[in-house]
Image (cartoon, rainbow, N blue to C red):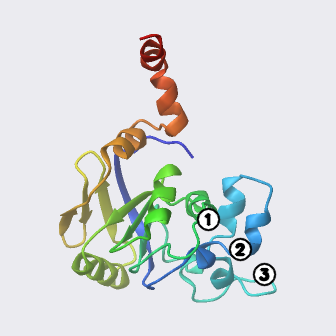
Amino acid sequence: MKQKFNIIESTCVPLPLENVDTDQIIPARFLKATTRDESFFGENLFRDWRYNPDGSPVKGFVLNDPRYGGEILVAGRNFGSGSSREHAAWAIAGYGFKVVISSFFADIHKNNELNNFVLPVVVSPEFLAQLFESIEADPSTRVRVDVPAQTVTNLATGMCESFELNPYKKYCLMNALDDIDFLLLQKDRIEAYEKR
């Protein structure tokens, strides 16, 4: 969903697992879907971890735990590895996450998130470990992600880190523009260049 990014402050959903691949984020059988409806993919985010074969919720899985919620997913190292399916980013966005925090993202998945208005925030392993500890101690722990300043703050501890963000993608996120929108804004300049 296109939305302007500025400062996002939210509670978090912790997923302290490393090497979560795109097949775990959205299983391959959902790639045959003919819809692009974000809610469809959001409902099937982490499907095989979230639901039993009979469709009942798996007790103990974090998305089924009422203590956790919010717009920020905190994930273990190497999030989004595996195949390059964009459906994984659709599922994360469709569930309602605006930010994913991890110490490392697979490159293609990281770009897919950015293209689908989900901000991947890379933090140090130390920051990530402390954030997991804060959330475990108090599920109401809040995190502030300041996109203009490119900082992320654990409000429980005050610990803050800067994160990298491509200037073009930052501009697009802050102005709710996808790549086509951005090109359309440059139409006059493109036409002037073609005339020259």
32 horizontally vs 96: left or right: right
**Figure check: 3 above or below 160:** above
User: Which of pointers 3 and 2 indicates the residue nearer the eye?
Assistant: 2
Three-letter amino acid code at the position of disc 1: Arg
* Residue 85, disc: 1
Q: CA distance from mark 1 to mark 3?
A: 24 Å
- In the picture as drawn, the residue positioned furthest to the front comes out as 196
Dot 2 amino acid type: Ala
Element at label 3 = loop
**Where's residue 19, x and y in %?**
47, 83
Q: Residue 28 bears which disc, if any?
A: 2
Look at 27% across and 57% down and name the residue there: 164
Q: Amino acid at mark 3?
A: Gly
- Give the mark count: 3
- In percent of width and height, residue 195 lies at 46, 10
- The answer to which of marks 3 and 2 sits earlier in the sequence is 2
For the C terminus, give its image quadrant: top left
In this rendered view, identify the residue nearer to me: 50 or 26.
Answer: 26
Residue linked to disc 3: 55
* Residue 173 placement (x, y as % from top left): 41, 43
Q: Residue 47: which quarter of the image? A: bottom right
Quarter of the image for residue 65 reads: bottom right
Query: N-terminal of the two: label 2 or label 1?
Result: 2
In three-dimensional space, the C-alpha distance between marks 3 and 2, rounded to whole angstroms, equals 17 Å
